[in-house]
Amino acid sequence: MDIESGALVALVLGFLLGLRHATDADHVVAVTTIVSEYRNAWRGIWVGGSWGLGHTTPLLVMGTTILLLKERVLEQYEAIAPVFEFGV
């Protein structure tokens, strides 16, 4: 398997696992509760999208950092993981 196909498989797998995670009961209930406070559908879409962006941004930042800095970052990941969790 070459690098391009390996990267594509990783992206597709990550996307599918993210979809599965996003549809877990705790996420659905949390977003439904937040969105149900607004009677405007566009406001609900905005809140739901913001929720998703809040989950995606730390993953993209951390993933890019790990790809660029590899070993140095992985050794210190346990110390910075709570910072990203707080950011979400």
Image (cartoon, rainbow, N blue to C red):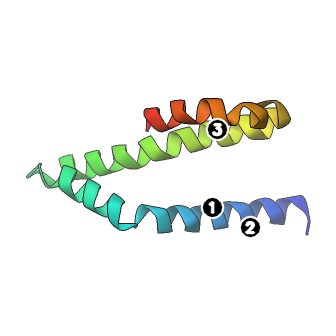
Q: CA distance from mark 3 to mark 2?
A: 19 Å
Image location (x, y in percent) of residue 30: 27, 55
Looking at the rendered structure, the secondary structure element under dot 1 is helix
Residue type at numbered disc 2: Val
Q: Quadrant of the N terminus?
A: bottom right
Disc 1 crowd, CA 10 A, few/some/many (<14, 14-19, 20+): few
Quarter-of-image position of residue 71: top right
Residue 79 drawn at (x, y percent): 64, 30
Read off the residue under disc 1.
14
State left or right for residue 82 relative to residue 47.
Answer: right
Residue behind mark 3: 62
Relative to 15, is 40 on the left or the right? left
Q: Residue furthest left?
A: 39
Q: Amino acid at mark 3?
A: Met
**Front of the two marks 3 and 2:** 3
Q: Quadrant of residue 70?
A: top right
Residue drawn at x 34%, y 61% as measured from the top left: 26
Q: Is residue 56 left or right of residue 79?
A: left
For the residue carrying disc 3, how many other residues have a C-alpha within 10 Å: few (<14), some (14-19), or many (20+)? some
